[in-house]
Image (spheres, rainbow, N blue to C red):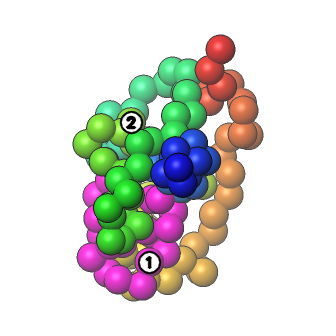
């Protein structure tokens, strides 16, 4: 009974949200995995309409990074990291500090590049 409610309300497990959490994680290997995912997402990025789809949850996950199946999700670069160069992302992964990195929203939410589904 609880699982369907949690799955239906699992908005924070969207890959973009998990990537932001991973980028600020205290474990370096998680931050490196995040940077790898962002670089991969940038390489396969196309400008098209985005649908915010709640990913299917893995209820048996032991860590937050395992809550979704990354291979079955459409992973995109979070808008808040879109202006960061790959070198800056790698520096964050190595040093673990995001406080000195200027972060801004490059595109308004709901703007021309990312619209809701019809």
Asked if the residues shown at circle 2 and circle 1 are in contact, with their CB atoms under 8 angstroms apart, the answer is: no
Question: Quadrant location of the C terminus?
Answer: top right
Image coordinates for residue 87, horizontal then vertical, percent: 37, 65
Mark 2 residue element: loop
- Front residue of 82/15: it is 15
The stretch of residues the image draws in magenta is 18-37
Q: Earlier in the sequence, mark 2 or mark 1?
A: 1
- Would residue 53 appear left or right of 92 to someone viewing this image? right
Examine the rendering and report whether any part of residue 77 can be seen.
no
Secondary structure mostly seen in magenta is helix
Image coordinates for residue 86, horizontal then vertical, percent: 37, 59
* Distance (Cα) linking label 2 and label 1: 22 Å
Q: Is residue 61 magenta?
A: no
- Would residue 86 appear left or right of 21 to someone viewing this image? left
Examine the rendering and report whether any part of residue 107 can be seen.
yes
Q: Residues within 10 Å of mark 1 (few under 14, many from 20)?
A: some
Name the residue carrying label 2: 74
Q: Residues within 10 Å of mark 2 (few under 14, many from 20)?
A: some
- Would residue 107 appear left or right of 36 to someone viewing this image? right
Which residue: 72% across, 30% down? 111
Which residue: 57% across, 34% down? 52
Mark 1 residue element: loop
Q: Is residue 19 magenta?
A: yes
- State whether residue 25 is above or below residue 50: below
Name the residue carrying label 1: 25
Which residue: 62% across, 20% down? 117
Image coordinates for residue 49, horizontal then vertical, percent: 56, 21
- Front residue of 93/56: it is 56
- State whether residue 28 is above or below residue 38: below
- State whether residue 3 is above or below residue 89: above
Image coordinates for residue 67, horizontal then vertical, percent: 38, 58
């Amino acid at each position: 009974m609880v699982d369907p409610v949690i799955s239906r309300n699992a908005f924070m497990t969207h890959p973009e949200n998990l990537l932001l959490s991973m980028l600020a994680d205290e474990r370096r290997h998680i931050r490196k995995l995040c940077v790898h995912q962002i670089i991969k997402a940038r390489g396969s990025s196309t400008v098209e309409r985005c649908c915010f789809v709640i990913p299917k949850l893995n209820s048996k996950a032991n860590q937050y990074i395992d809550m979704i199946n990354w291979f079955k999700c459409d992973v995109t670069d979070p808008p808040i990291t879109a202006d960061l160069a790959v070198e800056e992302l790698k520096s964050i992964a190595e040093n673990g500090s995001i406080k000195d990195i200027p972060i801004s929203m490059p595109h308004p939410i709901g703007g021309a590049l990312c619209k809701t589904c019809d």
